[in-house]
Amino acid sequence: MRPRHVGVLSALALLLGLPGALAAQTGTVRGRVVDATSNQPLSDVQVRVDNSTLGTLTQANGEYILANVPAGRATISARRVGYAVSRQVVDVPAGGTVTQDFALRVTAVTLEEVVVSGVGTATERRALGQNVETISAEQINQAAGVTSIDQALQGKVAGAVIIDNNGQPGGGVSVRLRGTGSILGGGEPLYVVDGVIVDNSSDALISISANATRDNAALSNRLGDISPQDVERIEILKGAAAAALYGSRANNGVIQIFTKRGAAGAPRITLSTEASQSWRPGDYELNMAPTAVHTDVVFGGASAIGAPVDRYDFQDDVFRTATGTSSQLAISGGSAATQYYLSGTWDDEEGIIRGANYGRNSLRANLTQQVNDRFDVTARGNFIRSLTKLIPEGEQSYGVISSIQFTPTTVNQGFDEATGRYRYNPILGPSIFTVIEDMKAEDEVTRFVGGLELSYRPLPSVTLRYLAGIDDYRQESKFFRPPLSMSAAFTGDITNPLLISRQFNNDIVATHTGSFGSDLGFTTTAGFRYTQDRAETIRAAASNLPPGTDLVQGASQSASQGRTEFRTMGGFLEERAAFRDRLFVTAGVNMDASSAFGPDEREQFFPRASASYVLHDEPAFQDAAPDWLSTLRLRAAYGETGGQPPGIYSRFDNYVNVAYNTRAGLVASVTAGNPDLRPERQREIEGGFDLGLMEDRVVIEATGYTKKTTDLVLSVPLPPSRGFSQQFQNIGELENRGIELALNTMNVQTPNFSWSTRLQYASNRNEVTRLVTSADTLQFGYLNYVIEGEPIGIFAGGIYARDGNGNIVYNSTTGLPVRGTDTLDVNGVATVFNARRIIGDPNPDFTASLQNTFTLGERLELGVLLDGRFGNDVANFSRRIAQYFGADKAVEREASGDTTARLYTLNLTRHLIYEEFIEDGSFIKLREVSLAYRVPESLVARANISGMTLRLAGRNLYTWTDYSGIDPEINFFSSSTVSRGVEFATTPLPRSVSLSASVTF
Amino acid sequence: MPTHRCMSGRLLSRLARAARGVAVVTLAGAAAGCDLDLANPNAPTQEEIITSFDGLVAVAVGMQDQYAATQDDYLIPNSLVTDEWGTRQLALASYTTLLTGLEIDAGYATIYGPWANSYETIRSANTILSAQVDLGPVFGPAMSSLAKLYKAMALGRLIMTYEEVPIDISVDAPVPQPRTVVLGTILTLLEEARTEINSVPDAQLSEYRRRVIGNDFDQANVIDAMLARYYLIAEQYADAVTAADRALAGMEEISYFSYSSPDVNPVYAISVASQYVASAKQWAREAEANDDRVPYWADTLVSPVPNTAEEVFALNKYQTQTEPLPAFLPDEMKLIKAEALVRQGAANYPAALALINEVREQDASAFDEPVADLPPVVLTTEAEFLAQIEYERRYELYMQGMRWEDVRRFGAAVAGEAPTIEFLPIPQQECDANPSDPCGA
């Protein structure tokens, strides 16, 4: 009981009055930080006064200045990702300056690294019972050709499955942390930039992806607006235990991004520029048979089966070698009291399909002012403008890749001199070239992300932090199809949706640190958060367009408007006890209230607790342990988080607009409101250890977790006689269990050569444990299902009929395979048509990545990242459709063989045997290769350049896979929660190389 | 309630009072954020509707749309299980099962649709009838009357499609009621609706018509027609005659269900837009020679797809997007009266014969209705009368949703071909989700 008492006391000390200013007696600490092995200066080292919030970063020359340090004895620590922390005790003279230099030793992992940890205050990793991964700026920016932060995380976070939705520049990325934790809700994590909750929505404003009538998400997502070059580090809070601070919004985990800050010293100017090239990873192999098959005849490309034909492969005209440029100018510096970081970035990236383009300009200012020795103000602002020119894809009549897959190769879609137009496609309508050249699909985003942070230290032991953050953007989309584009009778149409989104969050966190004697330390944190999201969509559309305009003009115009507003409010309290700085126990609770829920269920409590035991600091352990055991820490954590319902107005019986007889009317939605809706609740237990061997040259981090999500919101059928068809209810349950392993080794470390390796492994098992009824099969997309007892999104569909020995049964007359049936009667005749059977699982058995980093001499660094997914199935619907329409190379067999059986073309039986198209989608990608050279300072010093780095990098250069399509990694259904693992009519991920130069003045 | 809602605010403000410097900013934030009771800005909710005059008016408009826009869901089984329609090549499997009566699956949307749509209309009617705001001396009785009319018509669609259907849907487990009970409810609703609409002088209804029903729907006249229709089905023949007489006398124009853009005539939707159904050739072939009502309804010169074996002709009526559907056709009243007279005894045969021949000999109309232009007939026995009335109804009331009920009432002996099924099964979702176990699982 005693420790808890002290905690309450320390909380009281915090709550009761803050004494007036004590007489300020401060001094300055300055010095230089170098690498202990190479003696090279280290920039961006965090230098801090322990037990206070005073801190700064070193400059390029390794120097730092810390002002306003309270006079007297102080412990100064220097930390950098990849190095062990170093601490020195100094005596700070009042009004004077003391010099303290540091030499940092490389380690594979460090427990002293400071993370924000999800309670909003900096904490050393050693004190945390939950696994928090940190990714540094170097890791983010070593692979060039990356425009989005989450792309840069690929292969670097154990337990994160990060998938590019498609290969278009500015295209979206989908992230799953420790599996999927919802069915109807979102699956993407919450993103927080410098404490500001940012929008990462991927609502499809225009129908140019997947299939508008199925599971449709946009081709882009909004995290892509944040420039990776401004990022200092990223913390990934994977589980409920870590993400508890964000309470009812954190079921999918949280990704916290911290941008760069200035450091006291002379202005430091960094200019970097990059040029890149990218190209398609392969060709769709098309039917180039000299004679006609069935589909050629059906669609008018030949007079008879077997007749000689001309064939067309337009891939070289559709794809291109794309170029991109990326430049950044950053200036940072400041005085002891004022630090600034200013940057501007310019990106322009072409897509590998002609016409696709992504351009982004971003300006950032991060300013910190120490008003006095107790009060800091930080203001951050990021203004972004991006323009994405998208190419329609997916199952659309105007999809570009679909135009290759849905069209027999005898169809000439090229220019017709006679009509002055590209020839129409007899299956889809528009020529592939009309789509590329004449249609316009654009997203233009103007965005401001910024925050104001106040930090006040009324007592050395008390910190109050206030943050107001805003993410305000306007997304202007456009989808324009000119007259005559779809068909000769088409009169043109245009849709111009405008999305205005504003998210505001307001946090206050108070922290008190105290101790009871020298052995027992306490940290009490209390906070309050308020968030408000508001989005408005205004959609203007027109059809029957006059020539020469791509604005909403023309004979027939329409407009609509929708608005959502969502608020959450919550408080939290956390108490951490530290015993001799090696045993840490933390307990806390969040109270969260959300406008999405009715008053009875509005307030939800999310408790959490964790423990961390740094065993190697225990003297008894040190005595007993062998010399080669340098680090051993045990940790465990429990936490609960929540998820918001699929619709934020689901608690109401809503009415929808109708018109009848030119009068405005209202009809009740067939979805009954549910005032008792609650958040989907996740409970997670994780445990693990950190093990360091041989002076931490080998470090193993292992974590196991099991998380159960209950109260999953599902659509429950109601008796239609009540006038409703369904209601959202908290019914479902699912579980994710998994392990995450990371092995870090410093293989070689000499002044002239070093080699380090990081191997990551993660496996996750998902199981849907409860649906509305145990017989329910919920279908998503084409073949993704949610079935009790199975992993989420499992594939189900038609199968081959097989005999008792498992051999495929063929029709004795036609020689074609027979589609499987569920039940045969006594005579062997099918009585129940088998609609579906489980045929595959898009969830990987495990993911793994291998990063090797070599340093050659003082100046050359080589990084190689291999990233793989294993044991996941991919539905190759690209092949399915290309065979159905006779475009696939396999159909050549039909041209040269049996022309009556129609093994592939328009063969509905085979087409519906989905089993045929499920393939092993395992792959290993050469995700990143990066060779960096630091130009000798002596060569560039004359130009006033203090440092220059040249880098040659490659991305996705090679893929090892048995998958028969071009790219097993992309997903037709973008960031959809359940519909995963379908490769269909989607731009493949390009291979790219880049050359960049970074110059510091 | 506010203190409850703002609990976290209070927690914070206690903290904030202590933390003087930051308190001001924080309190401002907390106060602004205190209200988590956000309304849906896109649409009103049930609570807002039943306490709002304008909201209820909008629901009255929406209720008419719910009924009118789903008439296809009612007609699909009605015209397919009888001899009115055939399916076309594009038709869904569920349509074909209705046509053949084989392998009908209670999970099909064609089984679900007529049931669910009718109950959605009934729920809107119940919302109007549970108004918690004074609608005044004109809108009050007029909207109540309209709600009862649509509720009665929706229940009518239900009993003409399913054998037993629930009436009270305010409970969690609505229990299906026998047909006679439902018919009683329909007639009570209609009589109340009649009393209510007639309590308002017609001169005062102009604003109500402008806002709610328009000028092409004569509410009192439709109520009388529906009374005639359901008194006949209920075998209350004297009442049927009285109501039919009132409906004929009060009729100035045909009352219509309207389909102004963006609504689409439902027959157009399934016959032109999606090309699922067309007129069964058998229906046209079995007509008397030169019955002018056949070409009014169907184009017997055009098979939908030349040179195919489809057993259908193109429809000729309701083939444009905005064409309205009549609430009832005037000759239905004459034929109801004729049938009710015949069923009351031989004394009424001369009057009935006169009505039948009026229908047959009509060769022109001021209204948009079919005219037979046929010679008069002479009938003597009840069986002859009923067979003739059945014939006239078959061609006069083509695809008006009456055929299935007619075939059941007259019996296959009179009506020729029996329907492929007697009634639709109760939809699977109702069986699964209704705790009253309506399907006797």
Image (tube, rainbow, N blue to C red):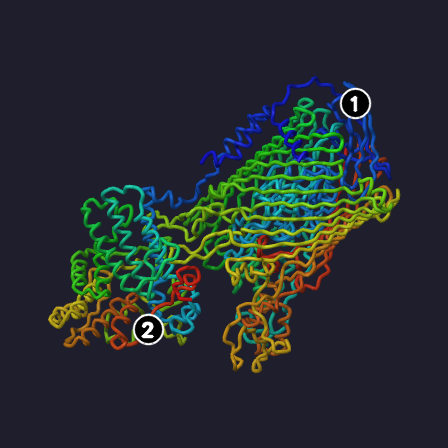
Q: Residue A813 in the image: x percent, y percent?
A: 56, 82
Which of A668/B292 is in front?
A: A668
Report the Cα–Cα distance between label 2 and label 1.
Answer: 101 Å
Secondary-structure class at tag 2 = loop
Which residue appears at 43% of the width and 69% of the height? B105
Q: Amino acid at mark 1?
A: Val
Residue A766 occupies quadrant: bottom right
Q: Report the chain holding disc 2.
A: B
Q: Are marks 2 and 1 on the same chain?
A: no
The quadrant of the image that shows the C terminus of chain A is top right
Q: Which mark is residue A92?
A: 1
Q: Determine whether, in the image, residue B180 is placed left or right of residue A658.
A: left
Which of A989/A264 is in front?
A: A264
Q: Are marks 2 and 1 in contact (CB under 8 Å)?
A: no
Q: Residue A520 in the image: x percent, y percent?
A: 73, 33
Residue A312 occupies quadrant: bottom right
Q: Determine whether, in the image, residue A828 is placed left or right of residue B374.
A: right
Q: Residue B37 in the image: x percent, y percent?
A: 46, 39
Rendered position, A947 above or below A824 = above
Q: Amino acid at mark 2?
A: Pro
Secondary-structure class at tag 1 = strand
Q: Residue B181 in the image: x percent, y percent?
A: 27, 62
Which of A288/B249 is in front?
A: B249
Foreground mark, 2 or 1, reads 1
Question: Does the image show residue B307?
Answer: yes
Q: Report the chain holding disc 1.
A: A
Mark 2, residue position: B419
